Image (cartoon, rainbow, N blue to C red):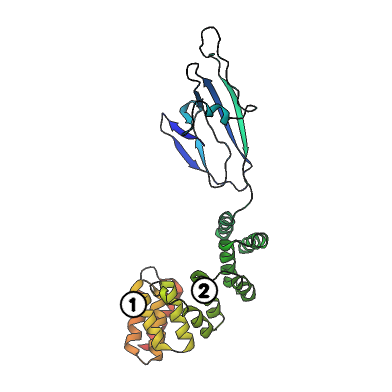
């Protein structure tokens, strides 16, 4: 392990690589005659892993040291075939003035990881290439069973394209946790199964402080026709996030079912007052206000 110590300001530029092959380190060494200590200079990593950073520097701008090395252990850390050191003159016991440079090559792990696969899929999604993202995730999940991040994103993409059978197949093989329960509840709600979604959510009463949990709970109550409980849950959502336009609109719908017209009007008006409300929600709330007024 090396630590880079700089004498001048350095600029570290992050560089993501899709398929890095190796890391190349150029090292020049001078052996001191008295103590046998080795000073190494000019470390430049031209290729590194996908989560590494590139160092943009001149060879003479940095000094590389090994933090926990001793004069005896430092020379052994470098491969004799890769790095050679200058000879010491026997007569005056001083190091030769010529420096010898070498290259140390270390193979890097190029296998995809769970997190790198998710990042690659998200880059594809940013380009609106959903099919390619799904195919990349499917391939990784088929090879590696313990890939919760990739499986979770894959299930989300299946739900976004209404591929419910594939989404349920991924969810059924997932570990028992709140995050997967929320995703499963969302899948059930999208398919109109309010009772199943409610049963899933009620297994985690400790999550009442989470906005996403209470929002799904309110949707489940509303889908079942329990509008009184739905209103109470939406009030909890809005206490956590008053700028949740969809919660205001859905609460207005349940208030209408409860024959509370004036409160429904207030809910729709509050939704419209939110500055960044999506245009479709604004239009819907305006239509409901016009109808009620």
Q: Residue at x 55, y 79 (%)?
A: 188
Q: Give the quarter of the image for residue 268.
A: bottom left
Expressed as whole percent of the image width and height from the top left, the position of residue 119 reads 55, 56
Q: Tell me if residue 271 can be seen.
A: no
- Name the residue tied to disc 1: 270
- Which residue occupies the extreme top position in the image? 91
Real-space Cα distance between discs 1 and 2? 31 Å
Residue 114 versus residue 2 in the image, above or below: below
Asked if residue 192 is positioned above or below residue 74 in the image, the reply reads: below
Establish if 71 lies above or below 119.
above
Image height of 125 relative to 187, above or below: above
Of the residues under marks 1 and 2, which one precedes in the sequence? 2
Residue furthest front in the image: 72
Provide the residue designation for mark 2.
181
Q: Nearer the viewer, residue 165 or 293?
A: 165
Q: Position of residue 198 (x, y in %)?
A: 49, 82
Q: Which mark is residue 142?
A: none
């Amino acid at each position: 392990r090396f630590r880079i110590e700089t004498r001048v300001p350095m600029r570290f530029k992050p560089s993501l690589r899709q398929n890095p092959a190796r890391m190349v380190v150029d090292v020049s060494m001078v052996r001191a005659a008295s103590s046998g200590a080795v000073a190494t200079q000019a470390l430049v990593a031209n290729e590194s892993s996908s989560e590494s950073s590139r160092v943009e520097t001149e060879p003479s701008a940095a000094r590389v040291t090994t933090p926990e090395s001793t004069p005896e252990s430092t020379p052994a850390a470098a491969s004799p075939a890769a790095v050679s050191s200058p000879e010491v003159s026997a007569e005056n016991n001083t190091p030769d003035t010529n420096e010898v440079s070498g290259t140390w090559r270390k193979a890097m792990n190029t296998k995809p990881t769970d997190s790198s696969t998710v990042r690659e899929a998200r880059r594809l999604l940013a380009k609106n290439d959903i099919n390619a993202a799904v195919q990349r995730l499917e391939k990784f999940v088929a090879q590696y069973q313990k890939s919760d991040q990739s499986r979770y994103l894959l299930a989300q993409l299946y739900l976004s394209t209404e591929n419910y059978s594939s989404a349920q197949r991924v969810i059924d093989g997932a570990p028992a946790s709140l995050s997967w329960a929320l995703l499963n509840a969302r899948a059930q709600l999208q398919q109109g199964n309010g009772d199943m979604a409610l049963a899933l959510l009620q297994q985690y009463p400790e999550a009442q402080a989470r906005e996403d949990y209470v929002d799904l709970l309110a949707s489940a109550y509303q889908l079942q026709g329990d509008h009184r409980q739905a209103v109470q849950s939406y009030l909890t959502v809005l206490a956590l996030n008053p700028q949740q336009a969809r919660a205001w609109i859905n609460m207005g719908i349940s208030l209408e079912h409860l024959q509370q017209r004036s409160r429904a009007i207030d809910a729709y008006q509050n939704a419209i007052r939110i500055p960044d409300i999506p245009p479709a929600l604004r239009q819907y709330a305006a239509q409901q206000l016009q109808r009620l007024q």
